Each structure stands twice: as C-alpha cells, then as structure tokens.
Amino acid sequence: KYMKESDAQAALRSGRLVGIITIPAGFSAAIERGITVPIDVRIDNVNLDLTNDVQRALPAAIVGFGHRNNFPGVRVVMAEHSVNPHDTGYIPYLVVSALALDALVIAGILGAMATAREWERRTVTMLRLSPAPTTAILAGKLCVSAAVAAVALGITLLAIIFGYGVVPVDIATTLLALAACVAIFTCLGAWLGATLKRTLAAVPLMFGLAMPLYIDSGALEPTRFDGEKIWLIAHLSPVYYAVGVLEWAFHGLRVTPEPVYVDLLVLVGTAMVAATLTLGSLSRGQRR
C-alpha cells in the first residue's frame, strides 16, 4: 500500500501498520550506476517474533532482488530503526495476555454460579421478600465473587512476577486494570448464569467459549498482524479489549489500534449491559 511518508509514520505509531519500507528518491538511477543504496525499514516491534521474522527475511529479499535484476553484486543494504524503545519477548507478552483469559474464566464462572444457583435452589422468588432492593443484593453477590476471583488472579500475578521474572512497568496501573477486568467479567458471567439458570450449563459453556475468545483476541500476538478479517472479528471478543488494557498496563505496549481508554470504555459498557440484563432476569424470576 503506497502512502505519504508522514501518513505512514502516523499509522505506524498508532498501530495501524506492521512496518514501512521507504524507497529513496533516485533509487533506480543509483542502482544502475552501481551505487549501494540504503533502504529504510521501520517495524512495529511490539512483537519480538515478528521483528525477528522480518530481520531474517530482509537479507534474503535483498539478495533475491539482486539476482532478479542480474546484479554482479548486491547493491542494496538494510537500515533498521526500532519504533518501541524495547522489545517484548513472546513469554512476557503471553503471560500477561493469559491474565485476561484467567480473569474471564475465573471471574466469569464465579459470577455465573452466583446467579444460576438462585434458580437451582429456588430462591429467586424469595428476593422480592427482602427489604433490600434487587440491585443491592446482586451487587453484594457479585462483589463476593469478584473478591474471590481477585485473590486467585493475585496469586497468578505473583507467579508471573517472581516465577517468570516479568515485572510490570507500573504495578499500581496493572492492579487497577486487572481489578477492572475481574469486575467486568464477573458481570458477564452473572448474565450468563441468569440466562441459562443452571450451573451445569453455564460453567461448561464458559470454559468452551474461553478458548475461541482467547485465540481471536490478540492473546498470542496483536490481531492486526493477522489480517483485516480476523482483526474485525476480534472486536466481538471482550478478551480483545482486556488484552489491550493489560498489555498497556503491564508492558506499556499499545497492541490495539484503538486507544486504551476506548478498550476500557467498551469493557465497562459491556459490564453495564450485562448487569442490566441480569437484573432483568432476576426481576422476571421474582414475578414468576
């Protein structure tokens, strides 16, 4: 895709391009005169594996270029510039995105159990007898579920820091982002439990949905590297936005073209819709 250099630089910084190859003015004339020409290649090195792939491929491409044009020697050299000040290895990237999956599974299952058991124990109709509003009761149940999930994820976070040696750039921001993901996924689980009304149905479904949502969410690498269609489909996964928030909080990486605050707003909006639908299910259960 051809574009102006200024537009390409802006797109690269915002995560909308994987890399830029700049062909300098007078390239063809210089090659014909046998002059070595530097080619500027700039890579979005948010993913170290992709950067290594490009580094390995460029020399072969340069040699192939020379052979196709019948050069007696290679007249093109590589000039590389990193966009990010540091590379992020595959394991450091993966363990952080795995936190998003943990939050979805643990918080989601606990939230689903908190609401589904109201139908299993036939206590839904008793909620209207309580002097407290349904909103307060649901909030209390979900706060307990979220607290238990937070403890479990806290242990996982300690394992990442002390076991793998992956230390967040800002621990306070990381804890806040993780707490937000726990709260949001607890609300999603609560809606699923209120919809299915059976723990035996909600829990296996949560496990079943976790892996496809995780794979198509930028958990293994930013989805913008995988093509436009996959990137668009990834927006249907709440884990996509959670990975964007957690990678930014943990590594300072922007892995989604959308700003981090947009990712967080989408998650918060999803949680609000899920909580509203859950209240609606509990209210209908009360009237029955």
Image (spheres, rainbow, N blue to C red):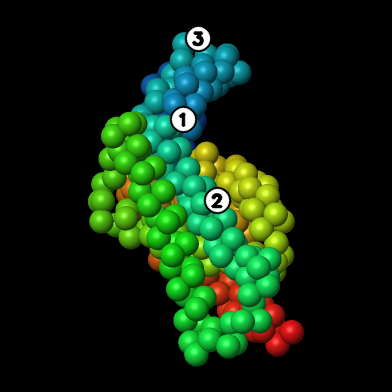
Taking depth in this image into account, of 15 and 159 the one nearest to the observer is 159
For marks 3 and 2, give the one nearer the viewer: 2
Q: Secondary structure at mark 2?
A: helix
Taking depth in this image into account, of 107 and 219 the one nearest to the observer is 107
Amino acid type at image mark 3: Pro
Instruction: Count residues near mark 2 (Cα–Cα under 10 Å), then give few for <14, some for 14-19, many for 20+.
Output: many
Query: Residue 100: x percent and y percent?
Result: 48, 50
Q: Which residue is mark 1?
A: 49
Q: Is residue 207 above or below residue 49?
A: below
25 left or right of 106 in image: left
Query: Residue 256: x percent and y percent?
Result: 48, 53
Label whose residue precedes the other's in the sequence (3 or 1)? 1
- Who's the residue at 39% across and 42% down the image? 156
Label whose residue precedes the other's in the sequence (3 or 2)? 3
Amino acid type at image mark 1: Asp
Q: Which residue is mark 3?
A: 72
Q: Which mark is residue 105?
A: 2
Q: Is residue 177 above or below residue 280?
A: above
